[in-house]
Image (spheres, rainbow, N blue to C red):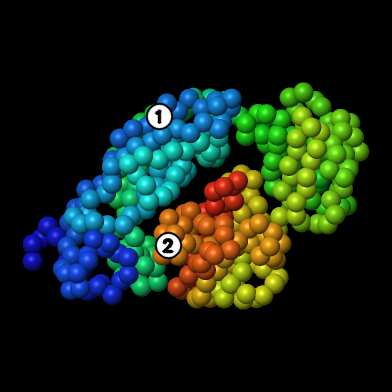
Amino acid sequence: MNNKTIIYLAFIGLIGLFSGCEKDGENVVMLKNPVSPVLTTVPDLTLERSNGNAMLEFKGTPVDPGFQASATYFLEACESGNDFVDYVQLYSGKTVSSFEVSVMDLNTEFLKILPADGLTNVDLRLRAVLTVDAGTGAPGTGDNLFSYPSSTVNKDVTTYGLPRLDLIGSGLTQKIESALGNGKYVGFVKLDPANPFTLTDPDSGTSYGGSSDVLAVDGPAITPASTGWYKLTVDVNDLTYTLKTFNVGMIGSSLPNGWSAPDSKMEYNPATGMWELTIDLIAGAYKFRINDSWDDGINLGIGDTDHPDYTTSNLWNNGGSKDIPLAEAGNYTVKLYIGESKYSVTITKNN
């Protein structure tokens, strides 16, 4: 056998590993050293709040394992010299030749590892992961991924800090932020009717309160209806606000209550922007929803064969989304990201 190739005949039962094999019994070979993807074009990363809705284009070339392969691509960034020990994911998807990310989303992700309102030198890379069915235990699955990073591209990034409103009296140190600096603020907050709260702009010193979704300068403290997590949205231009109950839970055959409520509830971590839960799970499947209901706007799973782009790195918020499989029982730490239009999950086995 040629020592520059690895023959994967032992894994012909895997579905989706090699999209280039069209004939039954055709031998597919993989280069011993596949050609990694290349991040060819990185735009100017001087990020400005006034340009938050603009889309910035990145370009790359695909991984070449020696055959036509299905791969998922990840754009990752870290502070220069960190060697991607602490990094953020700026993009994930099947498209690599040209893809776009908004200034607002880039800034939000960079603020997880970089200081606000400053210039920082960062390293970026494009990483390809070849697609293999999960749960088989074969090479390319679990912790033994076929993962191929590009060479790093060094770039200066200028971030902008987000205007915020601080919650006063809620019993916790909490804030909501305005990604565009346009007077519209949003965030996840934990509230209790025993702790009515007001909102203060730390820059101007203006205090807001209100009731029945109407905001007022120096208005009365706002009292939530019940204890739990909420999505709080405030518009200081129109002097309005909304409080939407937002208790995120895991549900499924892997969970203690199976497919029945109550769901296993997650806690929001404002430092990471993630919903987090450490829990014992059994082999099976799971999904995410809010408020123990499929009808409140969140139904997160993965795609079917007609929607292959929806993976754990790009969850599908849709009633037709599929359950996420879990092959092995154990204690897991689950971290879920819920953005305005982006959703992803990482699940790590602790034992």
Few, some or many residues within 10 Å of mark 2 (<14, 14–19, 20+):
few
- The picture quadrant where one finds residue 71 is bottom left
Give how far across and how far down residue 109 sits, in percent: 52, 40
Give how far across and how far down residue 131 sits, in percent: 34, 60
Q: Secondary structure at mark 2?
A: loop
The residue labelled by disc 2 is 306
Count the labels in the image: 2
Few, some or many residues within 10 Å of mark 1 (<14, 14–19, 20+):
few
Q: Which sits in the foreground, 41 or 308?
A: 308
The residue labelled by disc 1 is 43
Give how far across and how far down residue 76 sits, in percent: 41, 43
In the rendered view, tell whether residue 24 sits above or below residue 52.
below
In the rendered view, tell whether residue 66 sits above or below residue 124.
below
Counting residues from the N terminus, which is met first, the one under dot 1 or under dot 2?
1
Q: Secondary structure at mark 1?
A: loop
Q: Is residue 14 left or right of residue 237?
A: left
Extreme residue in the right direction: 220
At 59% from the left and 51% from the top, the residue drawn is 338
Q: Is residue 182 left or right of residue 22?
A: right
* Disc number lying in front (1 or 2): 2
At 58% from the left and 27% from the top, the residue drawn is 49
Q: Amino acid at mark 1?
A: Pro
Extreme residue in the front direction: 306
Say whether residue 265 is visible: no
Q: CA distance from mark 1 to mark 2?
A: 32 Å
Q: Is residue 338 left or right of residue 325?
A: right
Give how far across and how far down residue 138 sits, in percent: 31, 70
At 22% from the left and 66% from the top, the residue drawn is 22
Say whether residue 57 is visible: yes
